[in-house]
Image (tube, rainbow, N blue to C red):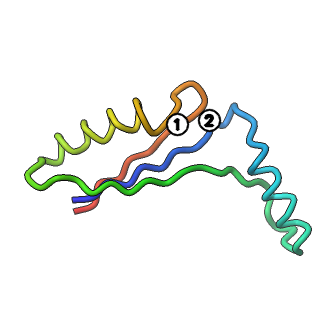
Amino acid sequence: MKARVFVSLKTTVLDPQGQAVCSALHGLGHPGIADVRQGKFFELALAPGLSGEQAREEVDRIARDVLANPVIEEYKIELID
């Protein structure tokens, strides 16, 4: 089983890197892009034998305590069989 964790800045937090990418895209001739928010992606290979509930609890704890800064970031978890 694998888990994917997507970490991004909360919508209330300014994203200067996303703004820079958006500006660059406009400069490259892509005026249809209104906004860009950047983030991080992690793919975790889980040990065999974990139940879906155990896996979700473990990955949630890792995402909350290690991968994301809960003050300025939010995260989403996907489990893949």
Give me the C-alpha separation between circle 2 and circle 1: 6 Å
Q: Nearer the viewer, residue 73 or 12?
A: 73
Per the image, label 1 sits on a secondary structure element best described as strand
Q: Are marks 2 and 1 in contact (CB under 8 Å)?
A: yes
From the top left corner, tell me how far across and down residue 25 is, in percent.
83, 66
Q: Is residue 51 left or right of residue 6?
A: left
Q: How many marks?
A: 2
Q: Amino acid at mark 2?
A: Lys
Q: Nearer the viewer, residue 29 or 44?
A: 44
From the top left corner, tell me how far across and down residue 23 is, in percent.
87, 58
State the residue at coordinates (43%, 53%).
Answer: 42
Q: Amino acid at mark 1?
A: Glu
User: Label 1: how many residues lie within 10 Å, few (<14), some (14-19) or many (20+)?
Assistant: some
Q: Quadrant of the N terminus?
A: bottom left
State the residue at coordinates (38%, 57%).
Answer: 43
User: Label 2: how many residues lie within 10 Å, few (<14), some (14-19) or many (20+)?
Assistant: some
From the top left corner, tell me how far across and down residue 13 is, in percent.
70, 33
Q: Is residue 62 left or right of residue 18?
A: left
> Can you identify the residue that label 2 sits on?
10
Q: Is residue 78 left or right of residue 28?
A: left
The extreme top residue here reads: 71
- Above or below: residue 77 compared with residue 12: below
> Can you identify the residue that label 1 sits on?
74
- Above or below: residue 43 compared with residue 77: below
State the residue at coordinates (12%, 48%).
Answer: 50
State the residue at coordinates (87%, 68%).
Answer: 31
From the top left corner, tell me how far across and down residue 67 is, in percent.
45, 39
Q: Is residue 42 left or right of residue 7?
A: left
Q: Specify the label residue 27 is tagged with.
A: none
Earlier sequence position, callout 2 versus callout 1: 2
- Above or below: residue 14 compared with residue 76: above
